[in-house]
Amino acid sequence: HEACTHGHKKVVELLLQHRALVNATGYLNDSPLHDAVKNGHTRIVELLLLHGASRDAVNIYGQHPADYAETDTVKSVLMQPANNEPSSINQCSEQTSLSHPREGPVVLLGSGLSSVQQKSLSKLSAILKA
C-alpha cells in the first residue's frame, strides 16, 4: 500500500514479482488500486490492473478506485477494459443488480479495523441483514 500511495513503481514491480496480493485491503478497506488512484500514480494504476487489480474493490465508504480519479489520464486508464472484461466496465450484471437481489449471506471483511470501526461494521451488517 505504501509503495502505491507514494508512487514507488520499482517497489510495486518487485512486490508483484514476488506474488504480493494485488487486492489486499488496508486502512479503510482501500485496495492498492485505491491508493494509486487517489495519489494520481498512473503508471502504478496501469501496473496493478495488468496484474489483476479489481476495479470493483469497495472501501468502507462504498467507493471504488474510479471514484477517486481526479485526472483525465487516470480516468482513461481505469476505463480501458482488461483482456477478460466486456468493453464497458460500467455494465451491471444481473447478479449484482439491485433489481435482482442476491440470495445467501453478505460477507463483510473487516480485518485491521479499530473497535469503533468494528462497531460501525456490525451495525451496517445488521442493517444489510434486515
Image (cartoon, grey):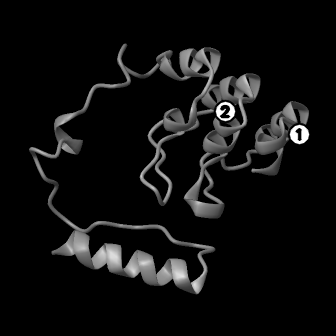
Looking at the rendered structure, the kind of residue marked 2 is Leu
Is residue 53 positioned above or below 47 on the image?
below
Q: State the image quarter where residue 26 is shown.
A: bottom right
Numbered label tally? 2
Q: Tell me the element at label 1.
A: helix
Q: Residue 48 carries which label?
A: 2
Camera-side residue: 85 or 89? 89
Is residue 59 positioned above or below 52 on the image?
below
- Horizontal side of residue 3 vs 103, given as left or right: right
Give the mark nearest the N terminus, 2 or 1.
1
- Residue sitting at x 32%, y 74%: 125
- Horizontal side of residue 12 vs 22, given as left or right: right
Residue pointed to by mark 1: 11
- Residue sitting at x 67%, y 29%: 45
Direction front: furthest residue: 70
Is residue 92 positioned above or below 15 on the image?
above
Direction left: furthest residue: 99
**Where residue 95 appears, x then y in whole percent?**
20, 42
Looking at the rendered structure, the kind of residue marked 1 is Val
Q: State the image quarter where residue 39 is shown.
A: top right
- Residue sitting at x 45%, y 84%: 119
